[in-house]
Image (cartoon, helix red, strand yellow):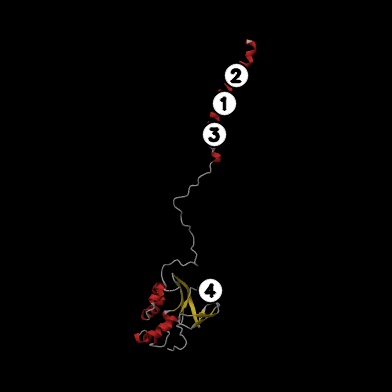
Amino acid sequence: MAINQVPTVRKLTLLGVSALALPILVACRADVTQDPVSPTDSQISPVETLPDVVEAPTGTPNSDIALTDDNLDDVISDTSSLSTLEDALDEAELGNTLKDGGPFTVFAPSDAAFAALPPATLEQLLQDENRETLRQILLYHVVPGQLAADQLVDGDLSTSVPGESLSIQTGDQVSVNGATVIEPNIEARNGVVHIIDQVILPPGVAL
C-alpha cells in the first residue's frame, strides 16, 4: 500500500515546485518590461547648436533697393543742384506733400534750368500773389507712383495736375516734354527724383 502512494507524492511535490516558481517568473518579466533599454548613441538624434550672433553678409548692396530713410523733400534739400527747386517748393507750400505723401516720381529742374527762364520770371513766381501758378508748375513735374528710369516707356504719364500728362521719350537718354533727364534715380523713402535740364510748363501756363 505504501509503494503505490509514492507516485502520487512525487506528483504533488512537482506541482508545488511549479506553483512556487510561477510568481517568480512573472515578477522577473514585469521587471524587464518596466525598465526599458536605453538607446545607444547611434539612436539619439544629434542636437544642432545655432550661433548666438549671425553676421550680416558682406558685399555690394543691391542698387535696386532704396537704402535711405530720407523723404523726397529731404533728398531735394540735400542735392546741391536743386536749391532753387527747394526754395520754390517752400514758397508753394508743397514741402509737406513731398515729405509725407507718395510714392511720387519727381522730374526736378536743376538750378541751371531755373536760371534759363526769362529774366525776372523766377522772382515773379516766388511772390505770394503768384503762388497758385507756381504750385501748378511744380505739380506738373510730379507723377504719382515710383518709376525708375528703366521703367519709363514712350508715351504719356499722368501728373499731379488733374487732367494733365507728360510726354516721355526713351532712347540713349530719357526726355520729358523735351527736357532731358541728366541725373536719374535719386532714391527716397517715398519715391524717386530725376533731375532734368529745363523747367516744363503745363498747357495754358506761359512765362
Q: Assess disc 3: are there few (<14), some (14-19) or many (≥20) residues with their C-alpha within 10 Å of its C-alpha.
A: few
**Which label sits on residue 33?**
3
The type of residue carrying mark 1 is Leu
- Residue in the image at 58% along x and 23% along y: 18
Select label 4 or label 1 by which is in front: 1
Pointers 2 and 3 in contact (C-beta within 8 Å): no
Residue extending furthest toward the left: 128
How far apart in space, not on screen, are marks 1 and 3 (Cα)? 17 Å
Q: Residue 89, relative to residue 53: is it above or below?
A: below
Select label 3 or label 4 by which is in front: 3
Residue under label 1: 22
Residue under label 4: 151
Res. 193 visible in picture = no
The type of residue carrying mark 3 is Thr
Camera-nearest residue between 21 and 143: 21
How far apart in space, not on screen, are marks 2 and 3 (Cα)? 32 Å
Q: Residue 97, relative to residue 204: is it above or below?
A: above
